[in-house]
Amino acid sequence: KAGVTQTPRYLIKTRGQQVTLSCSPISGHRSVSWYQQTPGQGLQFLFEYFSETQRNKGNFPGRFSGRQFSNSRSEMNVSTLELGDSALYLCASSFDPPPSGNYGYTFGSGTRLTVV
Amino acid sequence: GQQVMQIPQYQHVQEGEDFTTYCNSSTTLSNIQWYKQRPGGHPVFLIQLVKSGEVKKQKRLTFQFGEAKKNSSLHITATQTTDVGTYFCAGPMDSNYQLIWGAGTKLIIKP
């Protein structure tokens, strides 16, 4: 079966611009989580969606937002980009009916965002 | 707040030596998951442990979940170059089941 698809793979944006990243989960997976990873850093949780509802949110400023569509595809948006937003953004999907946390995540290859 | 601590941050080994990474949670976990991220890649799910005292093996990898379900370890026997990468553990929070991640242990094979 197809894996988690993230588009685009690479992106270069200018400070102050906004960006939208897309994630298509594995068919049948309804939970989608987003993470930010910077060089040498671990996984910083952004938010999680399940059945079009944001279930959890990490400690990121309001410039970071997301949504999930009825087909479970998800997008995340970052407005007013800053240099520090340069990172690998990873999407992960899981078959995860609440309450759970009991299923492994399948990650996409990520979108590498560079802000100049 | 609930935390998962993972040590060491880095481990340098000669090829053929063993490698171990440890995770400790501040609270009891319902399960613990392990992931591997190759350099330049994305995390890949390795395994999930659920039962107290559980031990699972995948070829040269041995995963353990402590009796109190607060700690876990991953041991690799006779490391190979294909084992290079960062190994993460993660467990669900009590309050909202969101995964809490360890900081990862980077396995480096000395030339």
Image: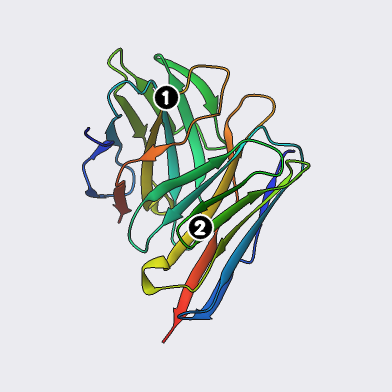
* Vertical relation: A58 (above or below) B24: above
Question: Which is more toward the observer, B83 or B3?
Answer: B83
Query: Residue B43: image x %, image y %?
Result: 41, 50
Distance, label 1 to label 2, CA atoms, is 22 Å
Q: Label 2: few (<14), some or many (≥20) within 10 Å?
A: many
Residue A84's x, y, as percent?
A: 44, 53
Which mark is on residue A69? none
Quickly name the residue at label 2.
B87
Q: Residue at x 38, y 20 (%)?
A: A30
Q: Pointer 2 indicates a residue of which chain?
A: B
Find numbered disc 2 in the image and state the secondary structure of the residue it sits on.
strand
Residue under label 1, please give it: A95
Q: Which structural element holds mark 1?
A: loop
Crowd rating for badge 1 (residues with CA inside 10 Å; few <14, some 14–19, many 20+): many
Q: Position of residue A14 (x, y in %)?
A: 27, 49
Same chain shared by disc 1 and disc 2: no
| Identity of the residue drawn at 55% across and 34% down | A58
- Dots 1 and 2: beta carbons under 8 Å? no
Q: Is residue B51 above or below residue B11?
A: above
Report the amino acid beneath label 2.
Answer: Tyr
- Parent chain of label 1: A
Residue in front for this viewpoint, B19 or A85 = B19
Q: Is residue B101 above or below residue A72?
A: below
Q: Position of A42 compared to A65: left or right? A: right
Name the quadrant of the N terminus of chain A: top left
Residue appearing at x 29%, y 47% in the figure = A109
